[in-house]
Image (spheres, helix red, strand yellow):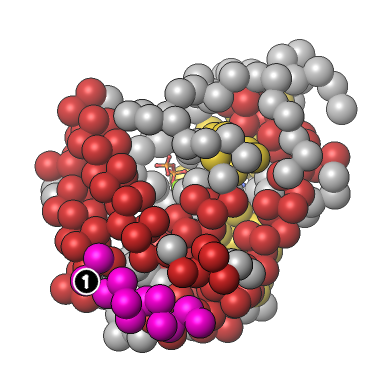
Amino acid sequence: MHQLRGRTYSGGGPEVELPRGDVTEGVVRVGDTVRRPHQPQSWAVAEYLDHLESVGFEGSPRFLGLDEQGRDVLTFLPGEVAGDPVPDWAMQDALLASLGGFVRRLHEASAGFVPTEPFPPQSVEQDPFELVAHLDITPQNTVVRDGAVVGVVDFDLASPSTRLIDSLNTAMHWVPLRHPDDLRHDVDQLARLRVFADAYGWTAEERAGLAEFAARRADLSYRRMKLRGETLGGGWARMWSEGVGDVIARRAAWLRAQSAAIGKALV
Ligand SMILES: Nc1ncnc2c1ncn2[C@@H]1O[C@H](COP(=O)(O)OP(=O)(O)OP(=O)(O)O)[C@@H](O)[C@H]1O
Ligand SMILES: [Mg+2]
């Protein structure tokens, strides 16, 4: 592996637009690579991706270097990625179980990584540092093949954090944990939470405290989204003005109201 900063990639071809997320503009596919605008966190992310490669983890893109235009070049992971709204195929319990196992393996692969490149500070407050985690494992950032999760992309929010925070965040997106008024699919949320919990392997202690921990994380997420919406502009401002804060506040209230039921569903 070349030193991070000296690594360049040349090779071109037709540029194919990829489905847009909320924040990053200009993500395109060129052959079997993806080009993304170089960002402040890119070196830290690249070092993390190098680590995952070095331990033989196959479920993340490789950082190939910068192209002639100074964009990050990553390997394209073949498979299917859910769009927004999430299609029915992405809401199958079997896929959720596969996801739980995948996130567990990602955490095991991440555990030995000691970053030397600084990750940008998280907004509002810093998560405790147990390992570097992805922290944005949404359906739109997850690659699926033959009904199983095989990869994650879009490491823009990766940061020192904890296994529990990242796995809970993943469950939040995928179960999903949100107020029933905000659901787009007819799902049994508590049953799905149990599927994820068993597949990932939350401990008895983690399960017992999960609802309250999730509600507190939702409170923090509200403050982070508000601050980003007010200071970063772009997609962050748009999400905030479109009411993402209300959805998060309803989630926190729902988690607190369901606390006993969630505890019961997890044992
Ligand atoms: N390495 C990759 N392999 C396969 N598909 C990818 C890869 N990178 C991106 N994609 C596809 O392109 C889409 C957009 O890319 P990405 O998630 O990196 O950016 P984004 O969602 O636009 O960014 P943000 O979430 O910061 O707004 C993804 O949802 C996925 O479908
Ligand atoms: Mg994305």
What's the residue type where badge 1 is placed?
A: Ala
| Coordinates of residue 129 in the picture (x, y in percent) | 58, 35
Residue 94 found in image quarter? bottom right
Residue marked by disc 1: 257
| Coordinates of residue 199 in the picture (x, y in percent) | 62, 74
**Residue closer to the observer: 70 or 110:** 110
Which image quarter holds the N terminus? Answer: top right
Q: Residue at left 24%, top 59%? A: 252
Q: Residue at left 18%, top 42%? A: 240
Q: Is mark 1 within 8 Å of ligand 1?
A: no
| Coordinates of residue 116 in the picture (x, y in percent) | 70, 20
Residue 191 found in image quarter? bottom left
**Residue closer to the observer: 8 or 238:** 238
Note whether residue 258 is visible: yes
Within 10 Å of the Cα at label 1, are there few (<14), some (14-19), or many (20+) other Cα atoms?
A: some
Q: Residue at left 28%, top 66%? A: 255
* Element marked by disc 1: helix
**Residue closer to the observer: 175 or 6:** 175
Answer left or right for 164 relative to 248.
right
Note whether residue 144 is visible: no
Q: Is residue 124 above or below residue 203?
A: above
Q: Name the main secondary structure of what is drawn in magenta.
A: helix
Q: Residue at left 52%, top 63%? A: 206
Q: Is residue 109 above or below residue 200?
A: above
Q: Is residue 25 above or below residue 85?
A: above
Q: Is residue 194 above or below residue 65?
A: below
| Coordinates of residue 143 in the picture (x, y in percent) | 59, 61
Magenta region, residue range? 256-267
